[in-house]
Image (spheres, rainbow, N blue to C red):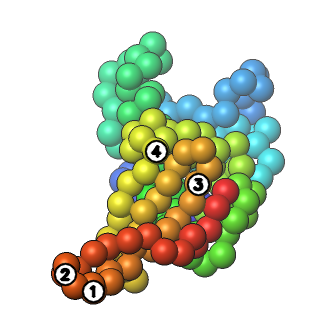
Amino acid sequence: MYEKLLDEANENGLTVIEKYPFLSPRIRGLCCDDTIAISAQIDTEAERTVVLCEELTHALHSYGDILNDPRMEHRTRQQIFDRLIGVPRLLEAALSGCKGPWEFAEYFSVPEDFFLAAMTNYRERYGTMTKLKTEKGEFILSFDPTFRVRRVVSTRGKEGTRKRMVRKENAV
């Protein structure tokens, strides 16, 4: 994913400085004009992916001085969660066998704390559960108290077609 983000930045005329020596360790990345700088203190590609995605999102979708605009930061964060994880891919990961947070984080190539923050965000946005229809069927994704996936199966009875949840696919 990191390489795709670098390619996207290049396609949009942005220069990415991958190991910028920021003086403060608190600065992980920065976007200014058509340049994105990523801190030299970031050790893992998973962390670099999240920082690059955030700065790229700012570069392409933000305008003006956003340093003191928490609403813009919140919207950007939601876009990053959807881009690097997303509910459809969350279902895909669960169906492929991911169970614990670290397995999901590894599947998405993001840090575990980023994955957990995304799950908190999805709980806030979708409530306790959401329904998702895919080519593999219809699923209920529960976010509270833990993440679970259940397949919705149609059964035919005397009263007609009924839908019910049968099988727990996965849990976090």
Q: CA distance from mark 4 to mark 3?
A: 9 Å
- Residue for point 45% across, 28% down: 73
Rate crowding at label 4 as few (under 14), some (14 to 19) or many (20 or more) other CA atoms within 10 Å: some
Q: Nearer the viewer, residue 168 or 26?
A: 168
- Looking at the image, residue 64 sits to the left or right of residue 124; the answer is left
Q: Nearer the viewer, residue 15 or 79?
A: 79
Circles 1 and 3 in contact, beta carbons < 8 Å: no
> In this rendering, which labeled residue sits more in front, label 1 or label 4?
1
- Residue for point 79% across, 38% down: 41
Residue receiving disc 2 = 160
Dot 1 falls on a residue whose secondary structure is strand
Q: Could you say where residue 21 lies in the image, as x and y percent from the top left? A: 75, 33
Q: Could you say where residue 97 lies in the image, as x and y percent from the top left? A: 66, 75
Rate crowding at label 3 as few (under 14), some (14 to 19) or many (20 or more) other CA atoms within 10 Å: some
Circles 3 and 2 in contact, beta carbons < 8 Å: no
> In this rendering, which labeled residue sits more in front, label 4 or label 2?
2
Dot 4 falls on a residue whose secondary structure is loop
- Residue for point 38% across, 54% down: 130
- The mark nearer the N terminus, 4 or 3, is 4
Residue receiving disc 4 = 128
Numbered circle sitting on residue 147: 3
Amino acid on which the number 1 mark rests in the picture: Arg
Residue receiving disc 1 = 156
